[in-house]
Image (cartoon, rainbow, N blue to C red):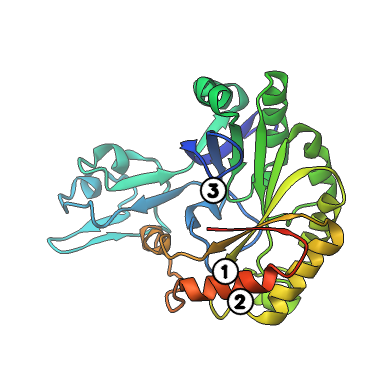
Amino acid sequence: MAPDTEGIIFDINRYAIHDGPGIRTTVFFKGCPIRCRWCANPESQKTALELAHLNHECILCGRCMETCPQDAIRVSDTNHLLDRTACDLCGKCVEACPAEALQVMGRTVSVDDLYAEVAADRPFWERSGGGVTLSGGEPLFQPRFVKAFLERCRANYIHTAIESCLHVATQTLAEILPLVNTVICDMKLMDDQRHRQFTGVSNALILKNMAMLLQTDQDMRVRMPLIPGVNDDLPGLEALGAFLQDHREGAQLELMPYHRLGEVKYARLGRSCKMEEIPAPSREEMEKAAGVLDKFRINLVTN
């Protein structure tokens, strides 16, 4: 794969209304440098292509087993077993499946092809003040391709947004900022030890990059998923409010309720979900957290 001209994505979501201003086309990139336990898109974590099995769609016909050249599939009257260590992602089982219960997650795209694919939505952007949003995973995990694609969008006067965890090299972030109209970034936990516990990495680089962004005139939105027992404690919420206020009064913070909609995806990829015991926050818990953050001179948005 040529890093300047080819990238790996796993989905394109059209008519998106929560990924920046207006109606947007959101491109989801594969690959992420962190591993949030609550990740709702586990198919986004690895850069490599992956095979997903949709158990509820499978009719146990056995055609995938008959087709697989690696002998990686076993199908009985009651079960479908996939040996992922033997699978070479040739895709022949996907082609053979009449129920579309097998899917290869991810595909390689060129700048030209991806631009042509999203540019078809231009009439919707122009009417609504929207554009293209790059999400993931972490788009800047593929920085050279993303920069080349953003340059194409900028040359064609398309509004661009990027959703980032900010665990990326500061220089990489600085290089793409002139090509991006809106930055949407996450702040998951202010306590570094707990951040390491629940994401696998320190938050030092994230805070450094966020502080840099907040001190510019970059249009940006900070998001935090409220997760009961993980980041809804008073010290953590106050630390977040103070950090945003200190670096940019009026900074926009979107407080979102953690949801469990992505749990089924782990099983499809042969993985286990690490957050099955954590419930979504109640309305009262959301209101309590909002009450803490509302004391700071920031623009709080809840949904």
40 up-or-down from 93: above or below: below
Estimate the x, y position of residue 21 in percent, counting from the top left.
Answer: 61, 38
Q: Is residue 195 left or right of residue 262?
A: right
Position of the N terminus by quadrant: top right
Choose top left, top right, bottom left or bottom right for residue 29. top right
Q: Which secondary structure, mark 2?
A: loop
Residue for badge 2 = 232
Q: Residue sitting at 42 percent across and 74 percent down?
A: 276
Mark drawn on residue 48: 3
Q: Nearer the viewer, residue 147 or 179?
A: 179
Q: Residue sitting at 26 percent across and 57 percent down?
A: 55
Q: Is residue 44 left or right of residue 87?
A: right
Q: Which secondary structure, mark 3?
A: loop
Q: Which secondary structure, mark 1?
A: strand
Of labels 2 and 3, the one closer to you: 2
Q: Sort mark 3 into few (<14), some (14-19) or many (20+) by Cα contacts within 10 Å.
A: some
Of labels 1 and 3, the one closer to you: 1
In the rendered structure, which amino acid carries the disc numbered 3? Ala
Q: Nearer the viewer, residue 102 or 262?
A: 262
Labels 1 and 2 touching (C-beta < 8 A): yes
Mark found first going from the N terminus, 1 or 2? 1
In the rendered structure, which amino acid carries the disc numbered 2? Asp
Labels 1 and 3 touching (C-beta < 8 A): no
Q: Is residue 137 left or right of residue 252?
A: left
Labels 2 and 3 touching (C-beta < 8 A): no
Choose top left, top right, bottom left or bottom right for residue 93. top left
Residue for badge 1 = 226
Q: Sort mark 1 into few (<14), some (14-19) or many (20+) by Cα contacts within 10 Å.
A: many
Choose top left, top right, bottom left or bottom right for residue 89. top left
160 up-or-down from 86: above or below: above
3D distance between C-alphas at marks 1 and 3: 30 Å
Q: Is residue 283 left or right of residue 149?
A: left
